[in-house]
Image: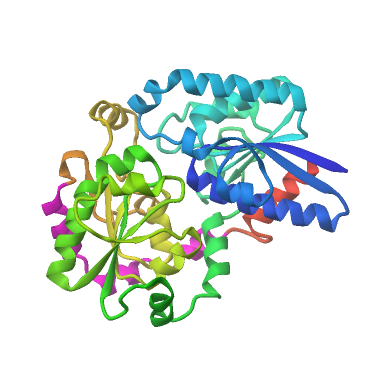
Amino acid sequence: MPHNILLIAGEASGDRIASRAIRAATELAHERGGTISFFGIAGDDSAAEGMELLHTVREMSVVGFVEVARRFWFFRRVFHEMVRELDRRRPDAVLLIDYPGFNIRFAREAKQRGIRVIYYVSPQVWAWHRSRIQELKKVVDEMLVIFPFEEPLYREAGLSTAQFIGHPLVERIEEERAGYGTRDAFATQHHLDSSQEWLLVFPGSRTEEVRRLLPMMSQAAKACAAQHGMQPILVESPAIEAAYYKGYLREPLVRFRNAEATHELMHHAQRGILKSGTTTLEAALLGLPGIICYRTHPLSFAIGKRVVKLPYIGLANIVLGKKQYPELLQNDVTVENMVQALAGLDLPEFKRSLTGLSETLRGPAPGPSRHVAESLLAA
């Protein structure tokens, strides 16, 4: 039978995860002699797998309490538009990926209409808003989590359908790694200098991140590269127009804009200046040492300090349980501090500390994307 799924992934990292789930679900439906279709909010990766986009991650992705408040009326309009689509199309299930401020409210609307809700990539209730677990118990039919410590947290709170299925980054990177070539070949293909170490700059996939981080990141990268003979490379996200990055570059960097090859670039690189978020976990899984930078609106940061109950801000550090990646926050994000932190990295020891992370996050067979596919086709 045909299946029709409403999917909401409001950020670039969620779009990448969604695209793999869409592909796996399409393949599984074909194996079973059926079809499955997706519509809703995601990005280019999901669209490439055949999803119908009603809104994109370019519109939806913001960071910080103040930044969200500024766009309140836009988000409200999109939310009610998606509820109308829920009523008009009556999908077989709703698949929600992270994006909790929007998705938890949307789960409530779907549940009220008797539509099955599958939440993939749990809201980070272990960091803040643990009270959300009680709300999720009421509105989510199946919680598919990507960190091993999340399953017992939900189950102890009474959400018995919570299941750790593995982190999709592990699945994706292991598949990609088989196709990695030599560093020299990669450098030739992408017009990079293989005779130098590569210092990667990741200012983010949101315009607000780029605006606040890239000017100082580019200056620090150029200064560090000059001192240590490295090639500084700006890694751009397709979720942001290339011209936007150019407006915040204070020093000329080599610009790399190829999402499909970014993981291989990280695999071959020696250091990274990383914005906080999923990028830090990608770096850790690929063995890339670096530092983490985070800057947002001062009021957003003040609110965050009050509500977030974690010793680290970087996702890699949270999973590792230690500050392996030096963290520079708010006013500490300066050119001088970045250069100093990068110079202080012990690269061999740093890489050794990342050993075993993939095993921790792997999860059971058949892997996260296939598991999501099976849940969707059972809906």
Point out residue 64 in the picture as x, y percentages from the top left corner. Answer: 35, 31
Q: Does 93 lie within the magenta span? A: no
Q: Nearer the viewer, residue 224 or 191?
A: 191
**Residue 7, x across and y down, in percent:** 64, 37
Question: Is 349 covered by the magenta stretch?
Answer: yes
Q: Residue at x 61, y 29 (%)?
A: 137
In this image, 90 relative to 331: left or right? right
Asked whether the viewer can see residue 164, the reply is no
Side of 98 relative to 70 (left or right): right
Q: How far from the left and from the top, in percent, is residue 112?
A: 70, 19
The magenta region covers 334-362
User: Residue 281's x, y, as percent?
Assistant: 41, 56
- Looking at the rendered structure, the number of numbered marks drawn on it comes to 0
| Residue under the point 44% across and 20% down | 72
Q: Main secondary structure of the magenta part?
A: helix
Q: Is residue 367 left or right of residue 226?
A: right
**Which quadrant is the C terminus positioned in?**
top right
Q: Is residue 25 above or below residue 379?
A: below
Q: Is residue 31 visible?
A: yes
Report the quarter where the N terminus lies: top right
Q: Residue at the spot x=39%, y=61% of the render?
A: 284
